[in-house]
Amino acid sequence: MDIDLTGRRALVSGSSQGIGLAIATELARSGASVVVNGRGQQKTEQAAAEIRREVPDAEVTAVAADLASGAGADELFAKVDELDILVNNLGIFGAKPVLEIDDDEWRRYFEVNVLSAVRLIRHYLPTMMERGFGRVMNIASDSAVVTPLEMVHYGVTKTALLAVTRGFAKAAAGTGVTVNSVMAGPTHTPGVEEFVGELVGDDLPWDEAQRQFMKEHRPYSLIQRLIEPPEIGNMVVYLSSTQASATTGGAIRVDGGYIDSILP
Ligand SMILES: NC(=O)c1ccc[n+]([C@@H]2O[C@H](COP(=O)([O-])OP(=O)(O)OC[C@H]3O[C@@H](n4cnc5c(N)ncnc54)[C@H](OP(=O)(O)O)[C@@H]3O)[C@@H](O)[C@H]2O)c1
């Protein structure tokens, strides 16, 4: 399969680091022009520079905007008018006992993890539908279907994203636009590397540390290692392609087999 995204305009929300940056890099490697986003101008510019180093002929634009609010989304809309590929990657997570999560925290998680995606889809989907091509991907998580006790609010927002995906896919029925969720599993990002160090100790070589972490704390993973961010990027590249035209309204797993079920 030869995937060429030349001429496609893509945006990845929350892509100044981590999985978002890897997705943006893989889209650029496949020829798409990419908008990277984060809250700070400098960090977002650095991410764009990193992609240009990795993919020398990449067409990358950095747009700093806080997508947790409608006003922040409007700043983005003023700079990016049309898209072929929209990746709602932005998501926050953090452990908190469920009985201590107050209304403001619930609202914050909903605003950042769900409404940020809804706003961008609402804005960009109509022109995709008019033009007869578009790809929307919402980055969900294994936590969408296995609610984690240590961050119930996070899990709930990811469950909501699966329904958001299904709903907008129905709205785009028959137009040539696809809308899917990508359910990532435990992934090797700087935050997770720190977390692994805290749980198994900082003195082990990385490969051994992650093996021990997976065995003790993520025993259901079938790959028994963390997922590398480009592995999620590769799925996004495929779903962005014309070849993926019959996949829509779905929840596609890149979880290393972590979710112990036959269907997502
Ligand atoms: N890591 C995992 O193991 C894992 C597993 C399953 C699913 N996921 C999902 O994958 C996605 C990415 O996770 P990650 O671990 O790569 O995240 P991360 O390392 O924490 O990165 C989050 C990104 O979002 C940006 N950001 C934060 N708040 C923002 C806002 N209000 N407006 C715009 N940008 C904002 C951050 O940049 P600035 O700080 O510069 O704003 C950063 O680029 C999330 O949806 C997460 O739920 C992650």
Image: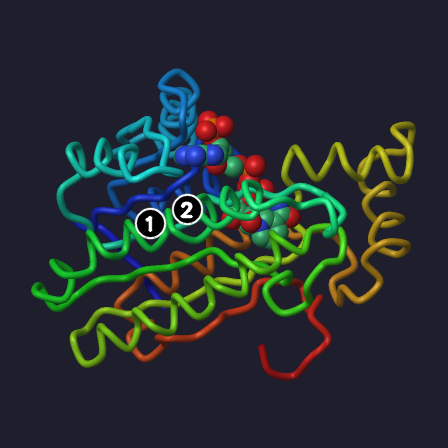
Question: Crowdedness of circle 2 by 10 Å Cα count: few (<14), some, many (20+)?
Answer: many
Against 166, residue 16 (above or below) is above
Question: What residue appears at the point 54 percent right and 41 percent down from the top-left corner?
Answer: 104
Q: Secondary structure at mark 2?
A: helix
List the residue tagged with mark 1: 30
Residue at 50% over, 42% down:
108
Question: Circle 2 sits on which residue?
Answer: 26
Name the quarter where the C terminus is drawn: bottom right
Which quadrant holds residue 205?
Answer: top right
Looking at the picture, which amino acid does disc 1 mark?
Answer: Ser
Q: Is residue 98 above or below residue 256?
A: above
User: Where's residue 257, x and y in %?
Assistant: 68, 69
Side of 203 where 45 appears, left or right: left
- Whether residue 229 is visible to the viewer of this picture, yes or no, is no
Q: Residue most toward the bottom?
A: 262
- Residue at 42% over, 58% down: 138
* Quadrant of the image occupied by residue 41: top left
Closer to us: 43 or 152? 152
